[in-house]
């Protein structure tokens, strides 16, 4: 392609509202332009890079045995109602009504395609003989993201490779999952990305049933933790924490005292105000954070259909919920997923919870007051201040780091008051019957320095990443909701077992830009570079220079090299600046004294100095250098 005939609007100025390097550089290098928040045009250079990434994804999907199809982006809203995802997606699901004659049709723009593909399979697969089957597409998705940001890293319209597997058994599912996982490793390695697979929320099947693929970068939106032993990595939502021994036994040596702490409903307020209230400093890690949740057995779909009044007949409403007091060290954050799982297990055998999901929400100020809690000032020993009735419906769960017998600053269960020297043994356990309803569990987000859950002496370290892909064992959620079943050898009917596998194709490009650049511009990995070679004649008005440059352009293309020919009539310095900015891997310069001496200059984008080659040998040398680089890159791709 000749530069003069394509459209590469590079920018000299740094765009003011672009927060991260990839966004700045993709704008400046003329890859993308914003139409509105969350929607971008891919300009020719950006589009070429995207198409190369897409081709790698397609190739690897096909070698993993997935079959390509193409589904519509417009979906009937009913499908989302049948799976309950209309509510689950909420505002993220873009949907609207259109008029068709005198009818109104309610449509959604597909945020992903589980519903559509499952509906398809439900209609056309009925026997175990037709399975396993893995289908994929590379197609535009729509999500009304609350905060579109970071250029094409988070947009409301993006290109996703989405694959869906359909199996008759968990073993079959495991096998597809393994193949997809391996394909993902190959895709990201081939695209030149340094990626880390991390364990993610596992959903219905449990175990290591979900992995996210992260590209590490300080500007990533996701937090992941990895053990320094190299045998465990997980995202923050999922990350477990190694063994920490609780200790409630330490005897008190200081008196519990109340301190007046007006208008301090958060740990941050409390620590900020502490010098004024108590004349000393207070660190969050020396405080206990106490939260109160309302927890109830979620009704099953069938029960919801029944009359609620009838359901509660003869059963006092109070029996249907618990108050859970949650205690964490002040510098730690509750992990709601962990908390929910622990509750599920603890309540497993309670009459009203059998066979049900646990419902939970942070208690509202109203509920809390009615139950006798002092919101903002609740302490771990809050049950002492509740009515007998409420106390009998109250349980306490404590993170091991908070279950230590040191002295804590904690809520005093009295408006505008905290206490110093809270001691578990004296203030919660001795002389009460609470010990048996105190549960010590891992319920917080892991942080830098925590012990690895492998309990092998490994320490967890935190980093940030961009989620470029996600593989997930779905189970039968969609097949059950949409009636995708198969008959086994014995003519027994079962729901099909599914998996889903997504890759953000735009994020491959953006993650490459984010992690591979210098102060002058982008540095494309060869495999996804918009062009492999940038050919620069120094002076386009010089006939001899142009004769050689044109010959190079033709011969390189004939050799299958993807060349951009900078035929613009501009000063060399100007062209070199653009060359660095757009980051094409190999640059060939023709003209000047070099050409008079019968030489051309060949330079990798990252090399300090060019290599000189005789004019006659230059094309061959370029082809050779590209082949060597490709071979070297291929060595980094897992088998
Ligand atoms: P995130 O947590 O970043 O919002 P997600 O977990 O909701 O993403 P998935 O449903 O797992 O995303 O989609 C599969 C892949 O699609 C993701 O791994 C990511 O690479 C990509 N992706 C998701 N949302 C966006 C978006 N708004 N813009 C660009 N790519 C996206
Ligand atoms: Mg995801």
Image (cartoon, rainbow, N blue to C red):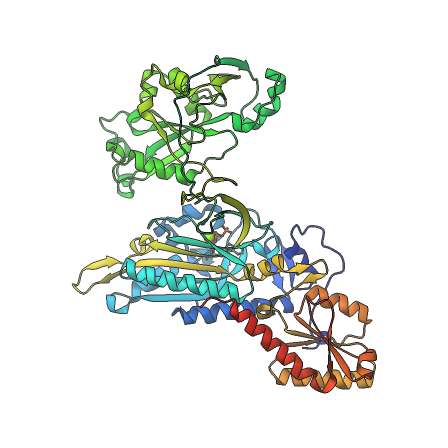
Would residue 569 be found to the left or right of residue 460 on screen?
Answer: right
Residue 271 in sight in this render? yes
Q: Quadrant of residue 603?
A: bottom right
Asked if residue 344 lies left or right of residue 490, the reply is right
Give the camera-side residue of 121 and 574: 574
In x, y percent, where is residue 471?
42, 57
Q: Residue at point 39% right, 19% down?
A: 425
Extreme-left residue of the structure: 490
- Give how far across and how far down residue 376 sits, in percent: 50, 23
Query: Where is 291 relative to 539, above or below?
Result: above
Q: Is residue 118 above or below residue 616?
A: above
Q: Does the image show residue 496?
A: no
Q: Quadrant of the C terminus?
A: bottom left
Percent x, y of residue 524: 63, 66
Please determine whether, in this image, residue 570 is positioned above or below residue 427. below
117 or 566, which lies in front? 566
Is 426 above or below relative to 573?
A: above
The quadrant where residue 42 appears: bottom right
| Along the line of sight, the residue nearer the viewer: 612 or 471 | 612
Question: How far across and how far down the image is residue 113, in percent?
Answer: 42, 59
User: In the picture provided, is 453 more to the left or to the right than 296?
Assistant: right
Quarter of the picture containing the N terminus is: bottom right
């Amino acid at each position: 392609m000749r530069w003069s005939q394509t459209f590469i609007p590079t920018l000299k100025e740094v765009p003011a509202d672009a927060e991260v390097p990839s966004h700045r550089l993709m704008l400046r290098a003329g890859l993308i332009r914003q139409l509105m928040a969350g929607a971008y045009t891919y300009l020719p250079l950006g589009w070429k890079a995207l198409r190369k990434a897409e081709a790698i994804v397609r190739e690897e999907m096909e070698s993993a045995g997935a079959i390509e199809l193409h589904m519509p982006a417009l979906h009937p809203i009913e499908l989302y109602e049948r799976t309950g995802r209309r509510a689950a997606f909420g505002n993220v699901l873009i949907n609207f009504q259109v008029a068709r004659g005198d009818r109104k049709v309610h449509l959604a723009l597909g945020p992903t395609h589980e519903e559509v593909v499952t509906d398809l399979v439900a209609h056309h697969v009925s026997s175990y003989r037709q399975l396993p089957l893995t289908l994929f597409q590379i197609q535009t998705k729509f999500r009304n993201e609350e905060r579109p940001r970071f250029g094409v890293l988070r947009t409301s319209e993006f290109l996703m490779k989405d694959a869906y597997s359909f199996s008759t058994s968990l073993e079959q599912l495991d096998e597809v999952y393994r193949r997809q996982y391996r394909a993902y490793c190959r895709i990201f390695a081939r695209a030149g990305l340094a990626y880390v697979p991390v364990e993610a929320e596992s959903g219905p099947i449990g175990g290591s049933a979900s992995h996210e693929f992260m590209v590490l970068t300080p500007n990533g939106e996701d937090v992941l933790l990895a053990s320094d032993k190299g045998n465990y990595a997980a995202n923050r939502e999922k990350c477990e924490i190694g063994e920490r021994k609780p200790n409630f036994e330490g005897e008190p040596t200081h008196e519990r005292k109340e301190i007046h702490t007006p208008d301090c409903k958060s740990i941050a307020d409390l620590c900020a105000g502490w010098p004024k209230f108590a004349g000393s400093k207070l660190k969050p890690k020396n405080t206990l954070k106490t939260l109160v949740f309302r927890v109830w057995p979620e009704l099953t779909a069938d029960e919801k259909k029944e009359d609620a009044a009838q359901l509660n007949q003869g059963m006092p409403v109070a029996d249907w919920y618990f108050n859970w007091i949650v205690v964490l060290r002040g510098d730690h954050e509750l992990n709601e997923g962990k908390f929910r799982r622990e509750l599920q297990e603890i309540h497993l055998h309670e009459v009203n919870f059998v066979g049900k999901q646990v419902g939970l929400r942070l208690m509202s100020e109203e509920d809390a007051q009615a139950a006798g809690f002092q919101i903002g000032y609740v302490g771990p020993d809050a049950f002492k201040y509740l009515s007998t009735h409420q106390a009998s419906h109250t349980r306490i769960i404590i993170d091991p780091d908070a279950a230590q017998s040191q002295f804590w600053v904690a809520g005093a269960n009295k408006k505008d008051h905290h206490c110093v020297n809270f001691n578990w043994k004296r203030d919660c356990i001795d002389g009460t019957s609470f010990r048996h309803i105190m549960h010590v569990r891992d319920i917080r987000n892991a942080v830098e320095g925590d012990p690895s859950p492998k309990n092998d002496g490994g320490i967890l370290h935190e980093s940030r990443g961009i989620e470029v892909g996600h593989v997930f064992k779905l189970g039968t959620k969609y097949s059950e909701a949409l009636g995708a079943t198969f008959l086994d050898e014995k003519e027994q009917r079962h729901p099909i077992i599914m998996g889903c596998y997504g890759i953000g194709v735009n994020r491959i490009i953006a993650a490459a830009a984010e992690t591979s650049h210098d102060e002058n511009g982008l540095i494309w990995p060869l495999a996804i570079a918009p062009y492999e070679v940038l050919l620069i004649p120094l002076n386009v008005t010089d006939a001899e220079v142009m004769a050689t440059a044109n010959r190079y352009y033709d011969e390189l293309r004939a050799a299958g090299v993807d060349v951009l020919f900078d035929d613009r009539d501009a000063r060399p310095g100007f062209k070199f600046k653009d060359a660095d900015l757009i980051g094409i891997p190999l640059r060939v310069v023709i003209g000047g004294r070099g050409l008079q001496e019968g030489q051309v200059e060949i330079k990798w984008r990252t090399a300090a100095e060019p290599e000189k080659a005789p004019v006659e040998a230059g094309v061959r040398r370029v082809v050779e250098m590209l082949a060597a680089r490709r071979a070297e890159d291929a060595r980094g791709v897992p088998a």
